[in-house]
Image (cartoon, rainbow, N blue to C red):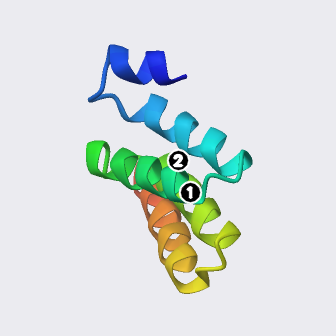
Amino acid sequence: MQDVVKGDEKAAEPHIFLALSYSRLGQNMAALAEGQLSIKLAPKNAYAHQTLGDIYREQKKFSLAATSYETAERLRGSESK
């Protein structure tokens, strides 16, 4: 996965998947860093916000998770209009 990220460092999607991978491996700081980077690269990507919310939830940062989930829902709502 790291090779994919290096191929196009400005694409958010590989960073999202790398964040998920790190989270599943228990590498919390790396997961958080990749999740936050994906948001910087694609601030209007609802899936990136959802993923970051999941990472925050796993780290028991519930208020940050709620904010990420709310942003994801707001973005999904604006897509359907």
Q: Is residue 53 visible?
A: yes
Is residue 46 visible to us here?
no
Residue 72 in the image: above or below residue 67: above
Give residue 5's quadrant in the image.
Answer: top left
Q: Badges 1 and 2: C-beta atoms under 8 Å apart? A: yes
Expressed as whole percent of the image width and height from the top left, the position of residue 27 reads 62, 52
Residue type marked 1:
Gln
Residue in view at x 56 percent, y 74 percent: 65
The amino acid type, in three-letter code, at marker 2 is: Tyr
Q: CA distance from mark 1 to mark 2?
A: 5 Å
Left or right side of 59 for 37: left
Residue matched to label 1: 50
- Residue sitting at x 35%, y 20%: 6
Counting the numbered discs, the total is 2
Is 80 positioned to the left or the right of 27 in the image? left
Q: Which residue is labeled 2 in the image?
A: 47
Provide the secondary structure element on which disc 2 rests. Answer: helix
Label disc, if present, on residue 76 of the rendered structure: none
